[in-house]
Image: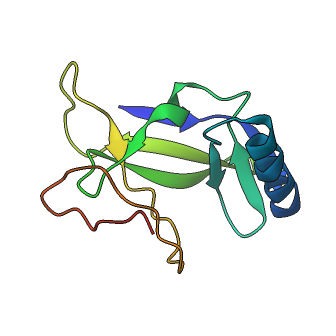
Amino acid sequence: FFFFYVGQSIRQVIADMRERRYEKEGIGSSYLFRVDQDIIIDATKCGNLARFINHSCNPNCYAKIVTVEAQKKIVIYSRQPVNVNEEITYDYKFPIEDEKIPCLCAAENCRGTLN
């Protein structure tokens, strides 16, 4: 199976502004997914259920950027059959940064951080 990650296509400058605004508004989570150096999909207020797929260091899905009619799209594909009531996960592959985000996936091979 696969899911499209749906939201508003925005530039990095806008994503930075929105992230600060979301924090000020008390929105606990923002759903910003980088497509490439220029484009980010913001699913925070106008996304689909794919925005709720959690990270795992041992995921059962993976994200891939594909081009459809000259537009880049994010597609989440399953790596294996996913059972009913099994959580759908993929590796967020956040860039390495000094300030670490703890990983809570509890996979045997957990890296300990998302970045």
Quarter of the figure with residue 76: top left
Position of 85 compared to 98: left or right? Answer: left
| Residue most extreme to the top | 84
Q: Residue at x 70, y 46 (%)?
A: 41
- Give x and y (percent) for residue 70: 75, 51
Q: Residue furthest left?
A: 108
Quadrant of the rendered image containing residue 78: top left
Q: Nearer the viewer, residue 24 or 85?
A: 24
In this picture, is 57 found above or below 30?
below
Q: Quadrant of residue 40?
A: bottom right
Question: Residue 61: horizontal and vertical position, in percent?
Answer: 33, 45
Q: x, y (%) of residue 43?
A: 67, 36
**Towards the viewer: 4 or 21:** 21
**Side (left or right) of 111 relative to 107:** right
Q: Is residue 97 left or right of residue 72?
A: left
Q: Quadrant of the N terminus?
A: top left
Count of numbered tags:
0
Q: What residue appears at the point 18 percent right and 25 percent down from the top-left corner?
A: 83
Q: Which quadrant is the C terminus positioned in?
A: bottom left
- The residue located at (80%, 43%) in the rendering is 24
> Compared to 33, does 4 lie above or below?
above
At x 31%, y 51%, the residue is 104
Q: Is 37 rendered above or below residue 72?
A: below
